[in-house]
Image (spheres, helix red, strand yellow):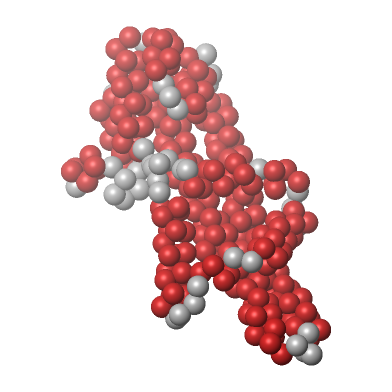
Amino acid sequence: MDPATLVGIVLAFVAIFTAMILEGGSPGSIFLAAPLVLVFVGTIGAAMAGGMLKDIIGLVDSLKRVTLSKSAVYDSLVDDIVKLAEKARREGLLALEDAMKEVQDPFLKKGLQLAIDGTDSEELAAILEAEVEAKKKADKQAATIFTAMGGYAPTIGIIGTVIGLIHVLENLSEPAKLGELIAGAFVATLWGVLSANVIWLPMGAKMKRLSDIECGQMELVIAGIINIQAGANPRLVAQKLRSLLPPGASKEKEKAA
């Protein structure tokens, strides 16, 4: 698992709470039920209004993907494809049917099945590339939802502050309560800005980055399967695939340089 997102969010909250303590405040003072409900539920509601119901339903899965995403596995993916290329070169393409049982990547398994079934290389590439494009669109929509929530949250926080200040004005006859009421009113703005810049916008950026990595791996698989189908030399397959990797993604590539 890549812990960057969870570690980053926790680190940001630690910095915020530490700053509050150093200023003589208490982190517990911002955990007020009304502002929290208004900002988080209101933000989700606004995002729902600006999208489709299925987008919000898929938000839980998107949160899991972003926070529990696996680290990129370029090297092991290339190694798996090269082993399959060696077997296909030595025993023929049909021999990969047994080897498929050990393949963990569902996209690689699907591509191999198409190749074994005798699908034309151009048609095979078109089918797999269409799946990559569909994934890109779905991931883009998920990232858009997070980014939209990052835009709505601060404004909803301001709405909460206005509501709080109205309540303050209703209690001008009780000066002893004004300080506490004003402080509570601004908690909504704090949570709006905080949630946008510490949670939603970073998650939107992470979703885009994660999509780039996963789609890059899928494109690597397509290139590998096309070469396996063509009966290319496994060593040449390895060189071609490693040349497609992003800088620093492969230890073997670094050694070759």
Q: Judge left or right: residue 111 versus residue 34.
A: left
Q: Position of residue 241 (x, y in %)?
A: 34, 36
Say which quarter of the image contains residue 176.
Answer: bottom right
Residue 216 shows up from this direction: no
Q: Position of residue 25 (x, y in %)?
A: 49, 77
Identify the residue at horizontal 52%, vertical 19% (top origin). 114
Q: How many marks?
A: 0
Residue 218 shows up from this direction: yes
Identify the residue at horizontal 64%, vertical 50% (top origin). 141
Q: Judge left or right: residue 52 versus residue 13.
A: right
Say which quarter of the image contains residue 251.
Answer: top left
Q: Judge left or right: residue 167 versus residue 241.
A: right
Q: Position of residue 47 (x, y in %)?
A: 71, 57
Q: Is residue 21 above or below residue 128?
A: below
Identify the residue at horizontal 49%, vertical 47% (top origin). 67
Q: Quadrant of the N terminus?
A: top left
Say which quarter of the image contains residue 79.
Answer: top left
Q: Judge left or right: residue 146 versus residue 69.
A: right
Which residue extends farthest right?
170
